[in-house]
Image (cartoon, grey):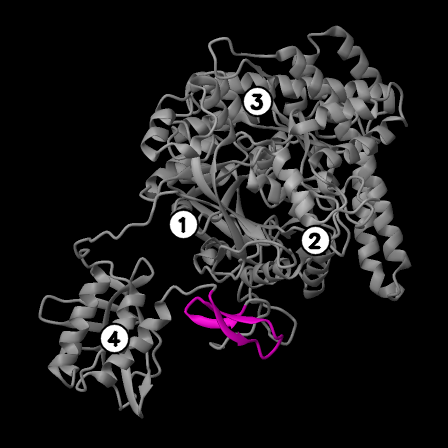
Amino acid sequence: MKQYIYDEVFQSTLKYFKGDDLAAKVFINKYCLKDKFKNLYELNPDDMHWRIAREIARIEYKYINPLSEREVYDLLKDFKYIIPQGSPMSGIGNNFQITSISNCFVIGNNEDSYGSIMKIDEEQVYLMKRRGGVGHDLSHLRPDGSETTGAANTSTGVVTFAERYSNTTREVGQDGRRGALMLSLDVRHPDIMKFIQSKLDKKKITGANISIKIFDEFMEALENNQEIDLRFPIDSKNSLISKKIEAKEIWDKLIYSNWKSAEPGILFWDNIINESPANKYGEEWMEVSTNPCGELPLCPYDSCRLLAINIYSYVENPFTDLSYFNYDKFMNHVKIAQRIMDDIVDLEIEKIDNIISKIKSDPESEETKKRELDLWNKIRNKCVSGRRTGLGITAEGDMLAALGFKYGTEQATQFSESIHRILAIESYKSSIELAQQRGAFPIWNNEKDDLSPFVQRVLGEIFKERNYQDLYNEYGRRNISNLTIAPTGTTSLMAQTSSGIEPVFQLYYKRRVKVNPTDDNVRVDYIDDNGDRWMEFKVFHPKFIDFCRIKFGIDNLHEYSDEKIKEFIELSPYNNSCANDIDWEEKVRMQGEIQRWVDHSISVTINLPKETTEQTIDILYRKAWKSGCKGLTIYREGSRSGVLINNEEQKFEYRDKIKRPKILKCDIHHPIIKGDKYLVLVGLFDDKPFEIFGMKNNTGLLNKYSKGELIKVKSGRYDLKIEGDGIMENIGEQFERPLHEYATRLMSWGLSTGSSVKRLVEQLEKAPSESLVDFNKVMARVLKKYVQRNGEKTGDKCPECGDDLIFREGCIGCKSCTYSKCG
C-alpha cells in the first residue's frame, strides 16, 4: 500500500476542497487512513470514498441485486449525496486499527454497588478505546448521605461518580479526537439539585455532557404549581428515601444552570419512550439513556451507526428563481442509503468479531479479559438482533436558503416537515424491501409494531401503496429503528454545508477545532481552561460563497471589505436566518414537527445571544415539551467556551460603575508578607472581581473562615457577614492607614468599571511608594489569582509525570495528570 508524506496529502486535499484549509485539516487528522505510526495511505478524500465503496460493495455481493463498487462510489463522491459519519468513515476498510464503526453506545444496569460502578467505568473505557461515544444513566445510584454497608457508612452520591466517569473519558484518547460521554439523571432522584448545579463549577465533570430525564408528570406539576416526590429507589413503591418538593424549585435551578453554563440539557423521557419502536420488543430493549449528543436513545449494550444524506444536493438551480427540489432523485437515494446502512451493520458485526478475536488472543489472563469479552458479546447480540440504523440528513439550512426559504419561518418549517416525512416513508419502504431480500431483523413481530405509534404513523403512509402492505405482512422489516438527526459537525465541514437540521451558525466566523494530544504537524492557537488545545480558522460559509458567485459573479470574498460583505449578506436568503437571528420558538416548533418522522431523536442546539434572559430559556424548554420534542440543548453565548466564536474584534469599552448588588459573593484570602498576616476580601460579581478590601490580621481571628458575603449598609463602610458564624463590623475603620483604604477604593472602582485585572496587578507590582509597597504586594498577590492566564505554559515540568505545567483556574497544574500546586 502506497504511503504519502504529510505535505503531499495536505496539498492534494487542499486542492480537493478548493482551498478550504479547515476541511483539509479535518480530513487528514480524523479520517485519512493511517497506521499507528501516523503514516498516511490516502492522498485525499477521493481515496477514502473508494475505500468505503469497496467494502460496501463486498457486503452487497452477499445478497441479491447488489450495488456495484462504482455505484456506491458515485453516491459518496465529493460528499455530494451520501455521507457515512465519523466512525464509519474512519473505520470502514481500515485494517490498521481494531475499532468499532458504531458511533454511539449506551451501557448500564440497575445495580447500586461499588462493584457495579466500577464495572460501568471499565466498560466505558473498553468502548472509548474502540472509538465509540458512550452514554449511561445514574438514576439507580443511591443519593448523597444514604446508608451503605461499607467503611464509609454513607454514600457520597451521584455527582461524585459522575466526576469519576468524566475523568475516565478525559483519560482515554482516540485517534483524531477525545472520547465523548453523556450522563443522565431522573428528575425524581434526591440528588437532582446537586446534579443540576454540578457544572456551574467549570472544573467539574469536564469530560461529559449531562442531561435531565423529565417526565410528563413533572411538567404537568410545573404547569399547575404542584409538588413532586423525590424518591429512591426511583421506581419503587416502597422508597427508602422520599421527600416532596415544588416542581418549580427544581425547574428554576435547571433553567438558571442552563442559562449560566449551557448544561444540563433536557430529555423529555415520556416522548422518547412512547415514540420508540424498539422498546415495544420487551424490557431488554427499553431505552435508559442517550449518546453524548442526545440523538440516539438506546437500551443497554446497543449501538448505532450513522449516515447522512446531503439534502442541499437535491436542489436544482440553487439560489435562483428556477430552483426546485428533485423529489424523484431524493426518494431513490433514500432507499439506497437505507440499504447501505444495512450493509454497514454487517460490517460492524465483522468489526466486533475482530475485536473479540483480538481480546481472546491478548496475553492477559482469562479473568482479566472476561468483562471485555462479555461486553462485546452483549453488543454483538443487540447488533444482530435489531440491526439498528441511524439514517439522517445534513444541510437543512442550506437547502432552505437555496430554495429561497427563510429558516425559522412557518413556510420553511412546513417544507422541512414534508422532506422528513418522505425520508421516513422511503427509509421504511427500503427496510421492508430489504426484509424480503435479506430477511427481517431476527426478533421482528408485527404485533409488537402495532404497539408503536411511530411505526403505525409511517406504515399508514406506506400502506397507501397496497403492495407494501402485503410485503410487510409477509416479510416484516429489516431494521428495528432506522432514523436519527445527528449534529454532523466535521462531516458537514467536509461536505461544506450547514450541519444537521441547524441553520447556518454565521456566514462569516472563526471556528476552533480541538487538537488531539498525539496529533503531529498541527498549529495550536488556543488552550482552554481544561488544557485542551485548539486550532482557529476564519471562514466564510461555503454555500454563501456559492450564493455570491451565482448572484453577483464574485469568486473571492476575501477581496471585499466588511461593509461590502454585509451588503451581500443582506441581499442573501441567509439574512436574519442564522443561528442567533431566527425565531427560536419557531425553530423549536420545527424540531417538534420533524420529530414526528424520526424514530430515534434529533440533536439540536438553540443558540441564543449573551443578553438572553432565563425567562426566554424557560419559555423555549416548555415549548419543546408541548411541541413533542424528545430533547433540547440551549447554548447562550458566553455561557461556556464554544468551538464557534464571533468574528468581531475585541475593543476597549468604558462603562460606568455597575450598581452594586446588596449582596455579593466573597472570596476570603489570608496572605502573609514578611511575617505580617493580612485579611483580604474580594467581592465577586458574575464570578469576577468587583471590589477588594484588605487589612492586617495578625490576631488570626478570621483565619478559620473561608466563605462569606459582603453586604452594603447605609451607615458608612461595609460589614462582613460570615455565613452562620457571626459578623465583623466596620471593616473601613480597621485599616491601619488611610492610604490603604484610599488604595482599595481606587482598586474597587477600577474593577467595577471593567479594568483589566492583569493590568491592575502589573501596576500594583510597579508602585514605588514605600508607605504602600508591602500592602500593594498583598493586593497584587491576591488579585493575581484572578488573572486569566489559563492554558499558558509556566516553563516548568510536572514533578509527577514530567509534562508541562500550565496556568489554570488561577493556579498552576499539569495539563496531563491531576497534579496541582493548589492541592
- Mark 4, residues whose alpha carbon is within 10 Å: few (<14), some, or many (≥20)? many
Measuring from the top left, give residue 811's x and y in whole percent: 44, 72
Which tag, 2 or 3, sits closer to the chain's start? 2
CA gap between label 3 and label 1 equals 32 Å
Give the alpha-carbon distance from disc 4 to disc 1, as whole Å: 31 Å
Label 3 belongs to which residue? 312
Residue behind mark 4: 764
Of badges 3 and 1, the one in the foreground is 3
Q: Is 379 located above or below residue 654 in the figure?
A: above
Q: Secondary structure at mark 2?
A: helix
Q: Which residue is mark 1?
A: 639
Q: Earlier in the sequence, mark 1 or mark 2?
A: 2
Confirm whether the magenta stretch covers residue 808. Answer: yes
Residue lying furthest left: 715
Report the magenta stretch's main SS. Answer: strand
Q: Is residue 111 left or right of residue 159?
A: right
User: Measuring 85% from the left and 26% from the top, which residue is drawn there?
Assistant: 60
Q: Which residues are magenta?
A: 792-814
Q: CA distance from mark 1 to mark 2?
A: 28 Å
Seen from the viewer's position, the closer of residues 356 and 490 is: 490
Hey, what amino acid is under mark 3? Tyr
Q: Position of residue 313 (x, y in %)?
A: 60, 21
Q: Is residue 745 magenta?
A: no
548 and 254: which is toward the camera: 548
Amino acid type at circle 2 is Met
- Secondary element under disc 1, as helix, strand or loop, is loop
